[in-house]
């Protein structure tokens, strides 16, 4: 019996050794489980899938590069949970991940899921890194376990406003009148309220604010009103499908404002839109999450994504970066212990450079990365270029749009 | 009261869960299932016993949830009176919708569609209003303390939800035995005949929808206290209207245990198929849908149904 | 808030064009309701499936949606026939609440099958005529929408002729009026049910082909049209073909104008309020005959 046991064990080792040949010396370190939470079914499945892709690519890269060094080369094992596009789904997956013994959770995508899931995780002092969810309520609840690497809503909107003014000033103030088109959810409504309060102070006149539901069946009336108002600028804040409809309808109706300046818009930072409707997409600007174009890793990751026949969306680099952040915290914590990881996350500083977002040196205050910021992109020559801020830009803005 | 024994047995057995099961995965699953069961029990009063199929119980669920949340967050009220007020306002909304719909003599699909439309109106309004936090939603401050109707342990919340479900079961049983219950069933079976026998059909339906709305509103309040976050699509979304009607129909509409049974079957099935999910998203839900159709074809409620029929005989 | 007349005119025209396709979607729903007396929860999912059908025809086979419309309609007729005959009929065993569950189950299956096969991306096609416009006075009307309007009217006429001039149509109407009586005179009720469901599904296929050039498809896209289709069915009177088309046009214009005056977002309420009012005041709808 004992003999047999030994024989079997050596056999198992033998097989494992063959499989894990490149990383042989470190193969014994126990894997670290990392929870990846994304909505891959239901209304948000498009974003969820791209988020998962980013997390997967990061985990593969870490494992291929020898795992977590500080833990003896421990591999990261993904524990994936489908939040099913609702908060209950998120909470139930957090419970499962807790039972599986994950060291941290990354993801959530939508604010309601992030709010509920991070709160559920806080019961276990389980670190939770929000990937996208921009609601400012996420980091204002005093939950010690919750971190957000990207910018919150307040930061995005004020940056969008500042950048718009800077852009317009630099071009000699060609635009004065504005029409705002927004989806009636969290992003759009909050954005419209803020723009309505702030734009007049900065010399713009808001001619009209048009809210639309998601999903919207038709954008002809929105286009009609824009055409009749003849604004210099159109500022849309909508999800992908609605903005594509709007942009195509505007093209069809021959509406050519001096600029289309999107804020947190699903489409103007989406290569599918650029590929499928190059004319409608051309020269559209967006203030949104976007990876840093100057980092070589960005192009490399994009290639990997496109090799899988997927489009390059911001969800992927954001989840990639969030996973890298957790890996970095694990390296610094030196043990796969939740409290230590929380401490390490909170202490993250500019030395963390493995992310690919266009942020300055990382610094967390109450769980929010103070360096998290959006950038302005513009569709130019069938590509998405960063035009603002200048520190990260890889193209000059084309504004005002003529002809 | 005869018939109360199985309910108490259910309560005791389920109440043991937090003592026997340490896994919060299971406890969280049970809590959510109980919340759905409560909402479904509300639907069952009106739909199961009264035969008035509503597609818009979200209107009551959402009202219970929002009132519970808003009174705490905006007016600093304690959670318990807020929760109670939520149930009360939900009942009023039920009465109002019932008054409009039943007075116009809406039945069958027409009643179903009008409730759906009311729920949608509430959803659009809640998404636009300041009071509800609009699209940003409303967040109840996390303060895990029994005084705030928040509990550090999932098991404690399970007991609270279970107590409410047990109350709802007892109330349903009492209704089944009452004059109102008999009249309600009479209306369901043959409205004209009931009227001919002197039943005030409108009054009976109104009482039923008010009770029904109160119960589903209580589920909404519980949801708010458990998840501590609401937005218009959660509170007034069609998902809860569907959950509330699905569970009783699967478990046995117009029976005391139907909604609980249905909720357990549906959510159990959901979890079971979810564990089958591979790397392709959606496959688990495809299986869920297929099993749902099979469940309709070969209903599990035939088991308790058979028992019930035998007892009557 | 006064708008110049040409804006209002254009909004009305937009509403008519959009409303026509709504009417087509509602046509299938109202027909199924009128005959089978069921509320088909799978309607939206079937529309989604049809839109993927048109998408695949275009991207994989290079067939333009307008060309694909008729073959797709035939295909979806068979699909609808089979679904009613093999799934909904046997599984529901004649009980309304079962039909509800079965169609709900079907919608979950179809929606997630689409998600599994096509993934979650929002897809659209770039038809060469998608950006063409038809000038109508000061208004620029998108070519695909004008085509949609014309095709809907044609489908409406064809369906009307089918229902009034053919033996099948007469059988359908007989079953709708009096199913036991129809069975007694030798009409195969199960077959007629399936035929009706098939026709309803075929209408969806045509609607899908008309929508695709100016719209998009994603696994949940059909849901966007379902509530509005219900509204139209109620407005037009459940079971009424003419009612569905006119109801579609009315709802289209109401949506367009209330969107203009209240904003697209709150404008949605306009539709639901009309829906509720019609139900409360005249539940048989504007064109419904039965009480």
Image (cartoon, grey):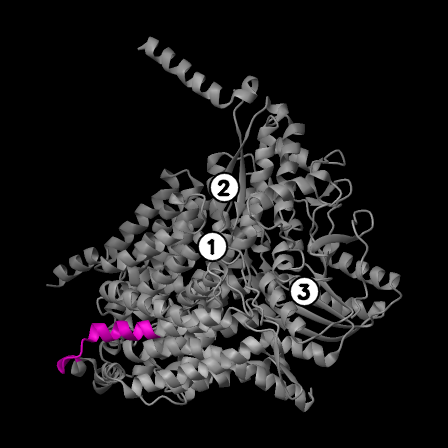
Q: What residue is disc 2 on?
A: A80
Tell me the chief SS of the magenta region.
helix
Q: What residue is disc 3 on?
A: A279
Disc 2: CA contacts within 10 A as few (<14), some (14-19) or many (>=20):
many
Disc 1: CA contacts within 10 A as few (<14), some (14-19) or many (>=20):
some
Q: Residue furthest right?
A: A172
Q: In this rendering, do the residues under marks 1 and 3 share a single chain? A: no
Horizontal and vertical percent for residue A127? 59, 39
Q: Which residues are magenta?
A: C183-199
Q: What residue is disc 1 on?
A: C118
The mark lying in front, picked from 2 and 3, is 3
Q: At 61% from the left edge and 71% from the top edge, which residue is drawn?
A: A212
* Viewer-side residue, B38 vs A148: A148
Q: At 65% from the left edge and 28% from the top edge, which residue is drawn?
A: A331
* Viewer-side residue, A156 vs A217: A217
Q: Earlier in the sequence, mark 2 or mark 3?
A: 2
Between the residue at mark 1 and the residue at mark 3, the CA separation in whole angstroms equals 25 Å
């Amino acid at each position: 019996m004992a003999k047999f046991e030994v024989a079997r064990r050596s056999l198992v080792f033998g097989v494992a050794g063959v499989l894990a040949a490149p990383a042989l010396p470190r193969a014994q370190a126990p894997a670290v489980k990392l929870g990846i939470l994304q909505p891959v079914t239901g209304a948000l499945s498009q974003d969820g899938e791209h988020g998962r892709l980013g997390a997967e690519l990061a985990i593969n890269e870490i494992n291929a590069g020898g795992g977590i060094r500080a833990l003896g080369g421990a591999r990261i094992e993904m524990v994936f949970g489908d939040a099913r596009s609702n908060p209950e789904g998120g909470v139930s997956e957090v419970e499962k991940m807790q039972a599986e013994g994950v060291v941290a959770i990354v993801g959530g995508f939508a604010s309601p899921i992030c709010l509920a899931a991070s709160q559920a995780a806080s019961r276990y002092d389980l670190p939770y890194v929000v990937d996208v969810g921009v609601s400012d309520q996420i980091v204002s609840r005093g939950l010690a376990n919750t971190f957000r690497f990207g910018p919150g809503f307040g930061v995005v909107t004020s940056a969008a406003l500042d950048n718009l003014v800077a852009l317009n000033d630099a071009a000699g103030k060609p635009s004065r009148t504005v029409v705002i088109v927004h989806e009636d959810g969290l992003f759009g409504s909050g954005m419209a309220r803020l723009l309505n309060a702030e734009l007049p102070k900065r010399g713009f006149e808001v001619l009209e604010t048009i809210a639309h539901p998601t999903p919207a069946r038709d954008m002809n009336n929105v286009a009609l009103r824009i055409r009749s108002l003849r604004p210099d600028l159109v500022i849309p804040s909508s999800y992908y499908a609605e903005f594509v409809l709007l942009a195509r309808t505007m093209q069809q109706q021959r509406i050519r404002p001096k600029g289309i300046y999107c804020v947190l818009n699903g489409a103007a930072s989406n290569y599918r839109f650029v590929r499928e409707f190059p004319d409608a997409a051309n020269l559209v600007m967006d203030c949104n999450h976007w990876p840093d174009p100057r980092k070589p890793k960005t192009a490399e990751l994009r290639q990997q994504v496109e090799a899988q026949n997927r489009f390059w969306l911001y969800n992927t680099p954001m989840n990639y970066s969030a996973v890298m952040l957790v890996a970095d915290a694990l390296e610094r914590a030196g043990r796969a212990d939740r409290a230590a990881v929380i401490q390490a996350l909170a202490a993250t500083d500019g030395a963390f450079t493995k992310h690919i977002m266009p942020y300055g040196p990382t610094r967390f205050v109450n769980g929010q990365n103070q360096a998290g910021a959006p950038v302005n992109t513009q569709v130019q020559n069938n590509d998405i270029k960063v035009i603002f801020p200048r520190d990260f830009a890889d193209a000059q803005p084309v504004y005002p749009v003529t002809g | 009261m005869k018939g109360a024994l199985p309910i108490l047995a259910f309560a005791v057995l389920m109440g043991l869960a937090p003592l026997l099961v340490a896994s919060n995965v299971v406890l969280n699953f049970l809590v959510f299932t109980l919340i759905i069961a409560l909402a479904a029990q509300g639907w069952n009063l009106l739909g199961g016993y009264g035969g008035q199929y509503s597609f818009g119980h979200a209107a009551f669920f959402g009202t219970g949830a929002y009132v519970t949340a808003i009174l705490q967050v905006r007016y600093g009220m304690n959670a318990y009176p807020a929760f109670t007020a939520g149930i009360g306002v939900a009942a009023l909304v039920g009465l109002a919708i019932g008054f409009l719909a039943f007075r116009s003599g809406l039945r069958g699909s027409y009643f179903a569609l009008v409730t759906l439309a009311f729920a949608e109106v509430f959803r659009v309004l809640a998404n636009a209003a300041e009071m509800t936090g609009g699209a940003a939603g409303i967040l109840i401050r996390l303060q895990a303390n029994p005084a705030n109707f928040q509990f550090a342990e999932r098991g404690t919340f399970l007991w609270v939800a279970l107590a409410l479900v047990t109350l709802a079961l007892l109330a349903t049983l009492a209704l089944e035995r009452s004059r109102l219950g008999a009249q309600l069933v009479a209306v369901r079976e043959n409205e004209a005949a009931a009227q001919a026998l002197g039943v005030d059909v409108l009054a009976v339906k109104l009482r039923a929808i008010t009770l029904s709305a109160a119960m589903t509103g209580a589920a909404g309040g519980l949801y708010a206290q458990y998840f501590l976050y609401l937005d218009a699509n959660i509170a007034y979304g069609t998902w809860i209207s569907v959950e509330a009607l699905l569970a009783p129909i699967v478990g046995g509409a117009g029976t005391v245990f139907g909604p609980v049974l249905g909720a357990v079957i549906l959510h159990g099935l959901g979890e079971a198929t979810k564990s089958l999910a591979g790397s392709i998203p959606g496959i688990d839900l495809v299986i869920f849908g297929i099993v749902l159709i099979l469940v309709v074809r070969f209903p599990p409620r035939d088991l308790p149904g058979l028992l019930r029929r035998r007892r009557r005989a | 808030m006064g708008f110049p007349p040409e804006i209002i005119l254009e909004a009305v025209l937009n509403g008519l064009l959009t409303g026509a396709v709504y009417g087509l979607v509602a046509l299938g729903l109202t027909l199924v309701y009128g005959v089978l007396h069921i509320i088909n929860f799978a309607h939206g999912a079937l529309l989604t499936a049809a839109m993927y059908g048109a998408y695949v025809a275009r991207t994989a086979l290079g067939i333009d949606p307008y060309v694909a419309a008729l073959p797709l309609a035939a295909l979806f007729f068979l699909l609808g026939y089979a679904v009613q005959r093999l799934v909904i009929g046997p599984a529901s065993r004649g009980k309304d609440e079962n039909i509800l569950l079965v169609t709900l189950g079907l919608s979950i299956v179809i929606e997630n099958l689409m998600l599994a096969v096509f993934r979650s991306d929002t897809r659209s096609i770039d038809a060469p005529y998608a950006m063409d416009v038809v000038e109508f006075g000061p208004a620029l009307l998108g070519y695909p929408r004008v085509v949609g309007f014309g095709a809907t009217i044609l489908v409406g006429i064809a369906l009307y002729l089918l229902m009034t001039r053919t033996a099948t149509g007469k059988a359908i109407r007989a079953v709708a009026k009096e199913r036991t009586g129809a069975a007694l005179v030798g009409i195969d009720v199960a077959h007629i049910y399936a035929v009706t469901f098939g026709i309803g599904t075929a209408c969806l296929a045509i609607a899908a082909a008309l929508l695709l050039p100016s719209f998009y498809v994603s696994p949940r896209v059909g849901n966007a049209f379902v509530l509005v289709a219900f509204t139209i069915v109620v407005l037009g009177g459940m079971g009424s073909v003419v009612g569905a088309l006119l109801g579609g046009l009315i709802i289209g214009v109401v949506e367009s104008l209330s969107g203009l005056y209240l904003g697209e977002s709150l404008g949605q309420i306009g539709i639901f309020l009309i829906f509720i009012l019609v139900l409360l005041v005249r539940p048989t709808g504007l064109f419904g005959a039965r009480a």
